[in-house]
Image (cartoon, helix red, strand yellow):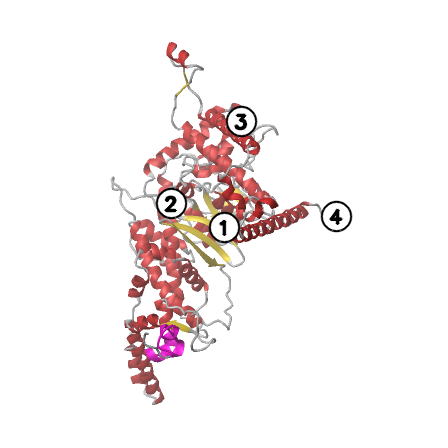
């Protein structure tokens, strides 16, 4: 018989201790203990048996021992003793001694905590959502002394957030954007890890009084140190020095992201020939204007035939300016998106762009004649008969600058979606957010103010972002859209129809890219429209990939004897016709498979997936165990709720479509 242990010497009573016991063991006060736990990542525990009471907070004994051996504990004790000395000197009205003690206050660093909590870089990337959200939040908050928010902390948060956004722009890592009442939701692909964060709107923030900002500042202290490590690693992965230097003039002019991208554009890795690689910072005045002056006169990549004709030969008519300008006859130059491997790609893009603008007219004379007779005021419109299909030039324009990118290369599509497009932002639109999104997808941005690469009257501008009921003066060589057009185009990887986002009209619903339609069971009407545009863009990319090279296909004869007797017939088949034939064969094969599955009886292997069947015979449920039956019923309840939600959404959509009586 073993030795009988006394009460409180084994089990949960020894493994866990209350917060008061932990503070006594560490000999610190509550604020220091809370701060130490936040920095070290120590969280309270919930033991099965609470020996000291139900209404108390418990910590694991090993966690408290872990805190006791950290060097931060001695630093906090030294600071506490210094605060007592400073308080005593001020009580004695010895200001000189108090000031000298305040200047010699001990400092500490928490770099070792970042290495301790995140031994691998991928671990830090996985836990980057909260640091980015907290940093962007404090970057928009005011520095108020009533809530003990230092101005230095706000400025540091602003700098770190812009540095991370500059990396996302430089690496073209942005994938999803959604605008909500809370702010802008972003998702980026950072070295294979999906990082999601929230950026508040640039509005006047009202700080609530019931929030403990000291706790938030403690979290922010660790998050800023973590973000500095992450930014350093990410910048060096692009061979860009860290930290970048802010342009003081652009920062004073509230240029935002352009102020930090100016330095990144000037420090780029050298290629083999000694020339600097293209930078994603095409919006700064110096590099962009130099590139525009030296670039050859080629048609913008991604424009339709009529847009290219209007940009190269037509003079933009402005109601408030003279239309007789000599520069109107110049062609529009292609803008580099800023990739390190764009030399060969840009050369092929220029040839392909000229082929898309001129060769497409030669392919279909009727379509070319119709596109040349369209109204110059709306370059996106085309005079087609109702039964006619969209021309190749119109379909190619949907894919944007990513026309010659493979469908499975999502990074390449995001990198070149706005390639060759120049946007001008109005004063009323959120400039910093649009600047971030457009440049991350390869576009060029201009605005009214200092640091802009071009003026509003520049002919190279293809789109103007306006968020007002009416627009006074309009240039006929560009499209006027609302800011939602940029976000919807980036989410679906296509150039949405500009007429749906025209100035003064109600735009389509802004669909969230974070919602899975398969899980919801309801597909909105506009989502179906965008999915059709995606299919057209995919077909255009396949057609462009097929027409870049000349392929010779060998036609197969009907029998093997004919192949042996006669020479193989060689004929040249267009890639578009081949794609249509393959698509028809796949659809026919799919319909045959559906017929076979409808007539065939379920096999024994399909019995394992019987829980996925919406309706099951009562006889089949008799042979189930109680656990299987409960699981099946729970799945049926979930499917029923999904169907009810889908039906309610469909009813709401049908009600909205009905005209008001």
Residue under label 4: 661
Of labels 2 and 1, earlier in sequence is 2
Residue under label 1: 514
Q: Position of residue 48 (x, y in %)?
A: 44, 69
Q: Let me know if residue 30 is in the magenta part.
A: yes
Q: Secondary structure at mark 4?
A: loop
Which residue, as the protein is rendered here, is positioned at the far top? 565
Of marks 2 and 1, the one in the foreground: 1
- Lateral position of residue 589 relative to residue 525, left or right: left
Q: Position of residue 315 (x, y in %)?
A: 50, 36
Q: Which labelled disc corresponds to residue 367?
A: 3
Distance of label 3 from label 1 (alpha carbons): 39 Å
Q: Let me know if residue 17 is in the magenta part.
A: yes
Which residue, as the protein is rendered here, is positioned at the far bottom? 92
Q: Eyeballing the image, is 553 above or below 290?
A: above
Which residue, as the protein is rendered here, is positioned at the far right? 661
Distance of label 3 from label 4 (alpha carbons): 43 Å
Q: Position of residue 462 (x, y in %)?
A: 48, 41
Whether label 3 touches label 1, CB < 8 Å: no
Of marks 1 and 4, the one in the foreground: 1
Q: Secondary structure at mark 3?
A: helix
Distance of label 2 from label 1 (alpha carbons): 38 Å
Residue range of the region highlighted in magenta in the rendering: 7-33
Residue under label 2: 289
Q: Secondary structure at mark 1?
A: loop
Of marks 3 and 1, the one in the foreground: 1
Residues packed near mark 1 inside 10 Å, few (<14), some (14 to 19) or many (20 plus): few
Of labels 3 and 2, earlier in sequence is 2
Q: Position of residue 97 (x, y in %)?
A: 29, 84
Of labels 4 and 2, earlier in sequence is 2
Of labels 1 and 4, earlier in sequence is 1
Q: Secondary structure at mark 2?
A: helix
């Amino acid at each position: 018989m073993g030795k009988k242990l006394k009460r409180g010497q084994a089990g949960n009573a020894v493994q866990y201790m209350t917060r008061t016991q932990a503070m006594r063991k560490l000999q610190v006060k509550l604020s220091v203990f809370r701060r130490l736990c936040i920095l070290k990542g120590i969280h309270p525990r919930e033991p099965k048996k609470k020996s000291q009471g139900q209404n108390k907070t418990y910590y694991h004994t090993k966690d408290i021992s872990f805190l006791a051996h950290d060097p931060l504990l001695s630093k906090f004790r030294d600071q506490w003793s210094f605060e007592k000395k400073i308080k005593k000197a001020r009580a004695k009205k010895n200001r000189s001694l108090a000031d000298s003690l305040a200047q010699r206050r001990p400092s500490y660093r928490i770099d070792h905590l970042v290495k301790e909590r995140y031994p691998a870089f991928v671990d830090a990337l996985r836990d980057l959502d909260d640091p980015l959200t907290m940093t962007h939040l404090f970057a928009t908050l005011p520095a108020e002394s009533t809530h003990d928010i230092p101005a230095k902390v706000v400025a540091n948060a602003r700098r770190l957030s812009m540095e991370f956004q500059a990396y996302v722009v430089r690496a073209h890592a942005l994938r999803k954007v959604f605008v909500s009442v809370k702010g802008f939701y972003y998702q980026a692909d950072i070295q294979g890890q999906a990082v999601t964060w929230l950026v508040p709107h640039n509005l006047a923030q009202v700080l609530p009084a019931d929030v403990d900002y000291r706790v938030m500042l403690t979290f922010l202290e660790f998050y800023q140190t973590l973000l500095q490590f992450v930014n350093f690693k990410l910048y060096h992965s692009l061979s860009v020095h860290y930290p970048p230097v802010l342009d003081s003039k652009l920062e004073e002019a509230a240029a935002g992201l352009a102020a930090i991208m100016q330095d990144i554009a000037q420090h780029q890795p050298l290629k083999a020939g000694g020339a600097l690689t293209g930078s994603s910072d095409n919006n700064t005045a110096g590099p962009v204007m130099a590139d525009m002056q030296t670039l050859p006169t080629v048609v913008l990549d991604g424009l339709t035939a009529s847009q290219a004709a209007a940009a190269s030969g037509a003079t933009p008519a402005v109601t408030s300016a003279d239309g007789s300008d000599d520069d109107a006859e110049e062609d529009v130059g292609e803008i580099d998106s800023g990739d390190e491997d764009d030399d060969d790609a840009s050369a092929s893009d220029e040839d392909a762009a000229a082929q898309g603008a001129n060769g497409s007219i030669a392919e279909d004379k009727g379509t070319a004649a119709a596109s040349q007779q369209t109204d110059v005021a709306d370059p996106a419109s085309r005079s087609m008969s109702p039964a006619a299909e969209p021309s190749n030039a119109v379909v190619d324009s949907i894919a944007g600058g990513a026309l010659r990118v493979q469908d499975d290369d999502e990074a390449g599509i995001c990198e070149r979606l706005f390639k060759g497009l120049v946007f001008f932002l109005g004063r009323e639109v959120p400039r910093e957010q649009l600047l971030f999104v457009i440049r991350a997808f390869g576009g060029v941005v201009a605005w009214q103010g200092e640091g802009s690469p071009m003026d509003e009257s520049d002919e190279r501008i293809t789109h103007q972002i306006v968020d007002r009921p009416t627009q006074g003066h309009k240039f006929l060589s560009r499209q006027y859209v609302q800011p939602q057009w940029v976000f919807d185009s980036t989410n679906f990887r296509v150039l949405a129809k500009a007429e749906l986002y025209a100035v003064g009209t109600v735009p389509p619903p802004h669909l969230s890219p974070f919602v899975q339609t398969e899980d919801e069971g309801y597909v909105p009407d506009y989502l179906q429209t965008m999915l059709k545009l995606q299919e057209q863009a995919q077909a255009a990319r396949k057609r462009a990939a097929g027409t870049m090279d000349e392929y010779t296909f060998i036609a197969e004869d009907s029998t093997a004897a004919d192949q042996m007797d006669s020479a193989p017939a060689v004929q040249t088949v267009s890639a578009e016709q081949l794609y249509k034939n393959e698509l028809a064969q796949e659809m026919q094969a799919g319909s045959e498979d559906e017929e076979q599955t409808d007539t065939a009886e379920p096999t024994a292997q399909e019995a394992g997936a019987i829980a996925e069947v919406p309706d099951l015979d009562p006889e089949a449920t008799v042979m189930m165990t109680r656990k299987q039956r409960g699981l099946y019923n729970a799945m049926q309840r979930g499917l029923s709720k999904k169907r009810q939600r889908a039906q309610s959404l469909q009813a709401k959509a049908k009600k909205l479509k009905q005209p008001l009586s």
